[in-house]
Amino acid sequence: MPTTESTTPADPTGTAAPTETAAPAETAPPTETAAPAATAAPAKPEKLPVPVSAGITLMVRVLAQPDPMAPVVMLLPAMALKAKYYLPMAQALFMAGLSVATFDQRGYGESKPALRDQPNFGYRELIEVDLPAAVGTVRARFPGAPLYLFGHSLGGQLALFHAAAAPGEIAGVVTIGTGTPYWKAFGRRNWFEAFWKIQTIGLVSRVRGYWPGGMLIGGAMAGQVMVDWARQSRTSWCRPKGSSRRHDDALRALDRPVLAISLDEDRLGPSSNVDFLCSRMPAARLTRWHVVESSGVAHRDHFAWIKDSAVIGRAAASWITSGQLPAGQAAEERNAR
């Protein structure tokens, strides 16, 4: 947990903002998929609008491999980040032979309307309305191809909850910097700071109807998202307002392959939080990779890792296509267990 307010991360493509957080268990390798051949540089992405309700349209962009059965990776952003922040990762995965879909969450990037021009919304809409619609659009574009969700921070939580709710749709999940916001998962020295900062964000969001950005979360966020997030931080359970689903119960039964990545300089989603979340999915076929200096990843905080997409993307692609991390990362995986 940071001791100072986080700032908007440098966006390698032009914009950005910070996020909230999120994984142990014995691991088993995911189901093998034939490794696709390396491919040429990506062409211009296709746009796939996703209407979800009156006047609200999300945006998915896809980079498609010539092979229609190549595995597809759908990238899910962290809080207050636009899809274009993840273009370096999209390009790395594409160059590894995978088809890729990027996704602008409700209120961000090319999704319409803008955040302040639509009704308040929370975790229920993100998990139970928006993501199923976006995943359905990607599956329709790539019928029959295995679909993997790759989520950063909040995006990883959404990916796991969706995979738990609809396991037949998802071949596996990759998360990075995704832990629980539960205050006790941050480690004793950070308990007080985690509790008061996250609850302050929840209170401000409840009173104002939105989070304007600042402490921990640098970009503006829908008020109910932050209220739901603060409640999860207090209790450790995901209980969104207006939802009758038991997302944590579904997560316990999730048996898909999961690659959970943490970074040794990440103070918003530290390894303790990632481990806590992983302990909530005991049936998952879990691979745990804790990224350290020897990984060949120079930038290892909650946002800057995107600058090392070539390394992380290659490792994720190896896991997706063969069920294994590359040799160097596999050693770190064993050490992290």
Image: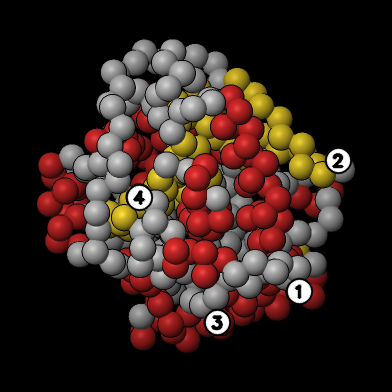
Judging from the image, what secondary structure is the residue with disc 2 in? Answer: loop
**Whole-number angstrom distance, CA of label 1 to CA of label 4:** 36 Å
Q: Residue at x 31, y 22 (%)?
A: 36
Q: Along the horizontal axis of the image, is 19 left or right of 31? A: right
* Residue 220 can be seen, yes or no: no
Q: Which residue is mark 4?
A: 257
| Residue 313 or residue 324, whichever sits in front | 324
Q: Can you give x and y, in whole percent of width and height, for residue 189 in the image?
A: 36, 84
Label 4 Cα neighbours within 10 Å, binned few <14 / some 14-19 / many ≥20: many
Q: Along the horizontal axis of the image, is 68 left or right of 44? A: left
In front: mark 1 or mark 4?
A: 4
Q: Are marks 3 and 1 in contact (CB under 8 Å)?
A: no
Judging from the image, what secondary structure is the residue with disc 4 in? Answer: strand
Instruction: Identify whether 297 is placed above or below 1.
Output: above
Label 1 Cα neighbours within 10 Å, binned few <14 / some 14-19 / many ≥20: some
> Amino acid under label 1?
Arg
Give the number of the disc on residue 55.
2
N-terminal of the two: label 4 or label 2? 2
Q: Quadrant of residue 62?
A: top right
Label 3 Cα neighbours within 10 Å, binned few <14 / some 14-19 / many ≥20: few
Judging from the image, what secondary structure is the residue with disc 3 in? Answer: helix
In front: mark 4 or mark 2?
A: 4
N-terminal of the two: label 2 or label 1? 2
Judging from the image, what secondary structure is the residue with disc 1 in? Answer: helix
Give the number of the disc on residue 206.
1
Q: Residue at x 28, y 61 (%)?
A: 264
